[in-house]
Amino acid sequence: MAHESNSNIDTKDNKPIYVTSPFLPPLEELYPYLEEIWKRKWLTNNGHFHQILEQTLCEFLGVKHISLFANGTLALIIALRAMRITGEVITTPFSFVATTHALAWNGINPIFCDIELETMNIDPNKIEALITPKTTAILPVHIYGNPCNIQRIQEIASNYGLKVIYDAAHSFNVTLNNKSVCSFGNLSILSFHATKVFNTFEGGAIICHNKKTKKRIDQLKNFGYDGEINVVGLGINSKMNEFQAAFGLVQLKYINKVIEKRKSIANLYRKLLCRTEGIRLLYDIEGVGHNYAYFPILIDKTKYGISRDDLYFKLKEKNIFARRYFYPLISDFPIYKKLSSTKSANLPIAEQTTKSILCLPIYPDLDNKAVTHIASLINNIANK
Ligand code: T4K
């Protein structure tokens, strides 16, 4: 996505507030890890910290197997290849473009399905009508870290013999009835990009449920090598390096505090915005352990007084860089527009949502004063 121009920002008096800002642990905590990397001279390819991070994340998230990746997009591309997905895959148009790109990179036809109004996740009631003899899988996204209707999606998948690959890029440490949201489906992928709740600068992972699948995934992320002289598949280089893994281990020490801080920001926004006419908020869902990765609001222009875009630009004038995640719909990008499933008539809720969504700044260093300032700007702009 295009980067915002910083040209008119007076960083002394009126610092820009971005939609997110990465949590960085104290620098000195990294030094022992760097010394260890220097000592070992093993920089990538299943190194010491890579192995420890995989093990530590399995224990922390309560999942069976994790394979670390250079980023979430490559994890998703390899997840589809590991499951030998081909033909058509039913997916959501309301996501970051990487979700659909991962299908396209595998030569798979994306079939866009509408979303639910409340959760903004793929609508299970609209999946079955899109299944054809070419359908091999469903690729839902737990958008903003809010779990999809996992039970219903699994029922459909089981009835039709389809695989389910979850794009859980936003869902680090999200639980459903005390189980990691990544324990469902055939595979789930996570993103550890700088903008995520847990970051390794760039990074990602695939979560799988058995050793055999993990072995295949690990081969595919290392060019398809099985040992030194045997290549067993069309792999790629998508390995996480030792610096990323070490950084992840340090980050993990702070993750509970990071999520707690995000929760308190979300609760403050809710308190300050819950009575504003024309703004819909998302609330915690019973049985879900949230990670507060994003703080989306939905603007109803007729009730709020101005459109989502007008609010977005007004906040921008005040150096507050909210983001229209996810706008436009993936199905509206020219490379996908030609597909028949992109017709507006098929995607009415997604069309409505993408025009009204705005994600407000949320990150651990955002103080209450800033949150109150942003909320009062939004409240003062209303119906003016
Ligand atoms: N599936 C889903 C559902 C996803 O949302 C994503 C990625 C993926 C798959 C693929 O995962 P990765 O391959 O990325 O691991 C960002 C991120 O690049 C992307 O990871 C994320 N989703 C997407 C929702 O957002 P941009 O282009 O909008 O972000 P960017 O670079 O403009 O950063 C947003 C703001 O964050 C900046 O305005 C300022 C702040 N920022 C950013 C960076 C990179 C910082 O303060 N520090 C930084 O280092 O895509």
Image (spheres, rainbow, N blue to C red):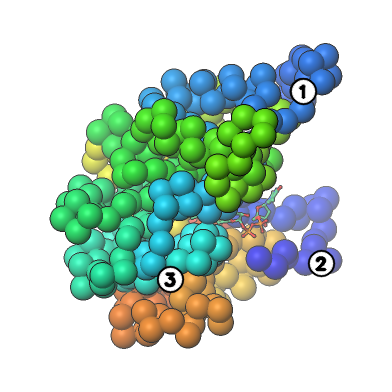
- Residue type, label 2: Asn
- Choose the circle earlier in sequence order: 3 or 1: 1
- Residue type, label 1: Trp
In the rendered image, the quadrant that contains the N terminus is bottom right
Mark 1 and mark 2: span between their CA atoms? 44 Å
Query: Callout 2 environment at 10 Å: few (<14), some (14 to 19), or many (20+)?
Result: few
Residue 24 x %, y %: 69, 33
**Which residue is the site of mark 1?**
42
Please give the name of the residue rendered at 38% of the width and 39% of the height, measured from the top-left corner.
182
Q: Which mark is residue 112?
A: none
Residue 107 x %, y %: 50, 67
**Which residue is the site of mark 2?**
8
CB atoms at circles 3 and 1 under 8 Å apart?
A: no
Ligand 1 located in image quadrant? bottom right
In the foreground, 24 or 374: 24
Residue 181 x %, y %: 35, 39
Residue 74 vertical position relative to residue 253 in the rendered view, above or below:
below
- Choose the circle earlier in sequence order: 2 or 3: 2
SS type, badge 3:
strand
Asked if residue 25 shows in the view, the reply is no
Mark 2 and mark 3: span between their CA atoms? 43 Å
Residue 160 x %, y %: 19, 59
**Which residue is the site of mark 3?**
109
Find out if the beta carbon at label 3 lies less than 8 Å from the nearest ligand 1 atom.
Answer: no
Residue 378 placement, left or right of 91: right
Q: Which picture quadrant has residue 211?
A: top left
